[in-house]
Image (tube, rainbow, N blue to C red):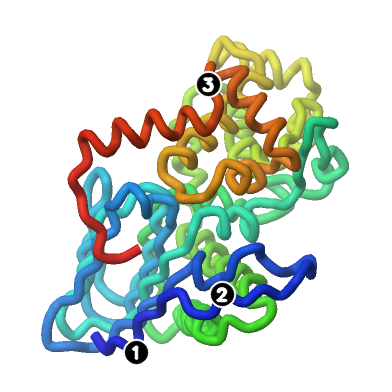
Amino acid sequence: MDPSERLSVRRQTSFGARHFDDPVPVTTQAIMDRFDPSLSAQDWVMNDPGRRDRCYAVLMLSGRAHIRLRQGTIECRAPALVWLPLGETQAVSVAAGAKGYLLSVVDDLVARHCGGGAVVGSGGVTGSGMAQMVVGLGGGLPLRFAADTVHNVTPAEGSDNLALLARSFDAIRAELLQNALGASTVVGAHLQIILTMVLRLAEGVMEQRDKHRPGSITFQRFLQVLELHFREHWNVADYAGALGVSERRLGSAVMRATGKAPLTLIHERILREACMRLEQSPLGVAQIAYGLGFRDPAYFSRFFKRYMGEAPGAYRRLRRAEERVRDDTFAAWP
């Protein structure tokens, strides 16, 4: 591979307090490799614990690829688009002669641009009005739901879908090279396009998966909408409004399926995400709190300790100490 094709951290430019800028450069949050036909296979290894905060996307324009996951493998032949969510990817190998792109992007960037933006602090929940505007099943595309699932889809050779994907991958690569004002916004927009294409090409996949989930239709829909909006800290009334049912009916459906109240499942989903990020992400506790929709990191720490019995920092130190004891992996690529 030509070294000029590998993108690394470049300019650490700060653009001030403009609302569309990230506190850290987008080049620390995303990396794009474009691979062109070569005489030998090309390999990337991503299983270092310090790099498990990333999602990956592979666009194959020609040739074949072998992708090793935490559990199982994917063998794909071009044209193909593979989306790999947080914590799934171990290694990617493309055969000699293959052409395409490999994108690495931190999950926080995906969440900000593909998972909704309402935030909450110790004063209460925001976004109750949004429940009437953004409904995961009927009104808006469930991009965050798609981003949390492994997908291997096939855009038709020579199709408009494949051309659009190639333009989006190339546009992200150009933005990372330039790292100009608002680069994160442009990268986020093209992430939305990529995940929209995943949904378009995987039509019916999520509906089939929902059919095999336990519980009533109301409970199944609640789980899906929860996955889309838990970072916005909707309350039970918000979820009931989005689903078009009463709070009492929602509570009964969730209780029958799990023996728990809806608010308990909401809190458990936030805590599960918090634990995963504390274990796998290099971001500080405050940044993780903001990424999970908390305005106040101190409130996040109190919330976490109330349920987990220890502060986020202590939880992270303990888990990483355990990880160092048992982990002997090496990562060659973020």
Amino acid carrying mark 1 in the image: Ser
Name the spot of residue 229 as percent of width and height, x first: 67, 41
Q: Quadrant of residue 180?
A: bottom right
What number is the disc on residue 310?
3
Q: Which residue is mark 1?
A: 4
Q: Quadrant of residue 121?
A: top right
The residue located at (60%, 26%) in the rendering is 304
Name the spot of residue 274 as percent of width and height, x first: 54, 36
Classify 298 as above or below 177.
above
* Between 48 and 247, the one nearer to me in the picture: 48
What number is the disc on residue 12?
2
Amino acid carrying mark 2 in the image: Gln
Name the spot of residue 118 as percent of width and height, x first: 76, 47
Which is more N-terminal, label 2 or label 1? Answer: 1
- State left or right for residue 11 relative to residue 319: right
Q: CA distance from mark 1 to mark 2?
A: 19 Å
Q: Residues within 10 Å of mark 3 (few under 14, many from 20)?
A: some
- State left or right for residue 184 relative to residue 73: right
Q: Quadrant of residue 258?
A: top right
Which is more N-terminal, label 3 or label 2? Answer: 2
Under circle 3, the secondary element is loop
Classify 241 as above or below 334.
above
